[in-house]
Amino acid sequence: MKHISNPQKRKGISLIWVALTFLVMFAIGGLMLDWAHVYLVGHQLHNVADAAALAGSRYVPDPNSSPAGYTARLKAQEYANANFAAKLSVNLNPNGDTLTEVDIDMMLPEATLYSDYFPASKGDIYIGRYIDDSRLFIKNDPYPDAMLVVTRKFTGQANDPLPLLFAPIVTTFYGGPTISSAGIQKYAVAKIDNPYGAGVLALGKCSECPGLLFDGGGADEDLIILGGGSLYVNSGYVDLSGKSGAIDQSGNAKIVLDLDRVYAVGSIDDKMDILEDTDVHLGADPEPDPYADVPNAVPGVSEDYDTSVPNRTITTSGPYWPGYYSGGIQISGGITVNLEPGNYYLDSVDQAASLGMTGGLITGEGVTLHIIGDADKGVDVQGGASDPVNMDISAPTSGPYAGIAIFQKRNPAYDCVLSCSDVPVSEFNGHGNIDIDGAIYMPHNKLTLGGTGDILVTRTVADRFVIKGTGQKLVDYKGDPKIATKSYLVE
């Protein structure tokens, strides 16, 4: 007998399969909608972090903020509050003061809480210094240039977790732990360039020669810049061999660069071993002359610049007063010159330099030495072991030359041909110690800092630099922090 199946039974089984398929599809579709919502809100949180970091980082070096960083944090909060995620304004916990450093590489992926790095108790806004090459964010650096902002929705934090619509139904129906919300975290890092100005600035924009040359024979050559200031070289020199550049090394000198930031329009000699916590920027835009508006000394116009008394040269010990000195300062061992406050206009009539020292001591407070002579050398300091040279002067704190201790006159005819040659040049060399509380400003001169003695200066700006000798070159830059005009995202 032939067996005939019951079609009604088959129809019942089909309905069961349709129902089960519907439930599965409903669960999958619902979870996909929840996931899409989480993705959308995460994108919104990322945008908020970007906006807050960009706004707040501009105020990181604000000199008027009390306490430090307060204004920057307020700006970050303000921009976060003005933006929305999941139709709600985003809040930030401003205090992020307890971390020492954050390795950005360790922050991926972003979908977890990172309790090791960003627990709620440590806040959402971090101020520090960001190193481009290593992607290291150094928290509580004394001279910060960046802000890291964390935006998140988590239980017990500034923003509640994101409620889910379908996940609690699906997880409850299938008997698992109920998932009713999602925690989301995003971050952004924004920074500003050169927030404290250049402690050492090579103004020359020539592409035919380096703006800063370490020229030594194997001994340590130290260049230390304190106060957050950078080493900035406007030269666009790039050697085709790839062995030298805007910052170049000649000989076998051991270079010691102890500073936070290096900017070069051109390249850097690849033989140099720059410390990993130094932030290096190549292909930078040229830095403008910070003293471009400071007036040149003019006879009969500038204070005490009276050329009617000729043939005055400082050669012997004693106190001296501001004014014009046709023969400049020319002293040797055993001579002590004490300068009263004011402007000294040092010419080079019948002299090889406006300021020549083969020994002796120059002291003075509130003085500016104007190097106005036309000799090939403006400053020629060459102390010997038995006759060291010593200088202890400070710049005025007010007036047109405030902060400038040595000002070599501008030379409009100066060009790259002169810049890359040996003249004009000023040199601090030999034995002894140079202590200048103020800036050395030589916009059209090559300045050599060398010798076995230490050189301490507040700031130095010249067309080009040569660094050599075993003495320490310490630029104790006071910095010039200001609110930045722009910031940019790095993470």
Image (tube, rainbow, N blue to C red):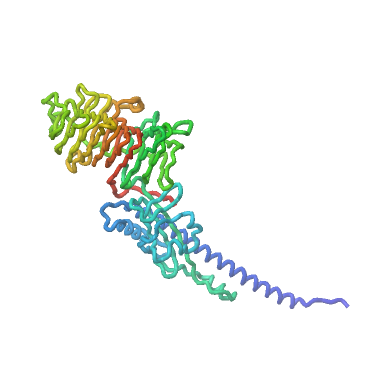
Residue 46 position in % (x across, y down):
44, 57
Whether residue 149 sits left or right of residue 366 in the image: it is: right
Q: Quadrant of residue 229?
A: top left
Whether residue 16 sits left or right of residue 144 in the image: it is: right
Residue 205, above or below 193: above
Location of the N terminus (image quadrant): bottom right
Residue 389 position in % (x across, y down):
25, 34
Whether residue 155 sits left or right of residue 365 in the image: it is: right
Whether residue 348 sits left or right of residue 286 in the image: it is: left
Extreme residue in the left direction: 308
**Is residue 255 at least partly visible in the picture?**
yes
Total numbered labels placed on residues in the image: 0
Q: Nearer the viewer, residue 18 or 176?
A: 176
Q: Quadrant of residue 252?
A: top left
Residue plotted at (52% across, 72% down): 179
Residue 52 position in % (x across, y down):
37, 56
**Is residue 444 at least partly visible in the picture?**
no
Residue 478, above or below 17: above
Residue plotted at (56% across, 75% down): 172
Extreme residue in the front direction: 386
Residue 99, above or below 285: below
Extreme residue in the top direction: 350
Q: Nearer the viewer, residue 427 or 420?
A: 427
Q: Nearer the viewer, residue 250 or 400?
A: 250
Q: Nearer the viewer, residue 217 or 290?
A: 217
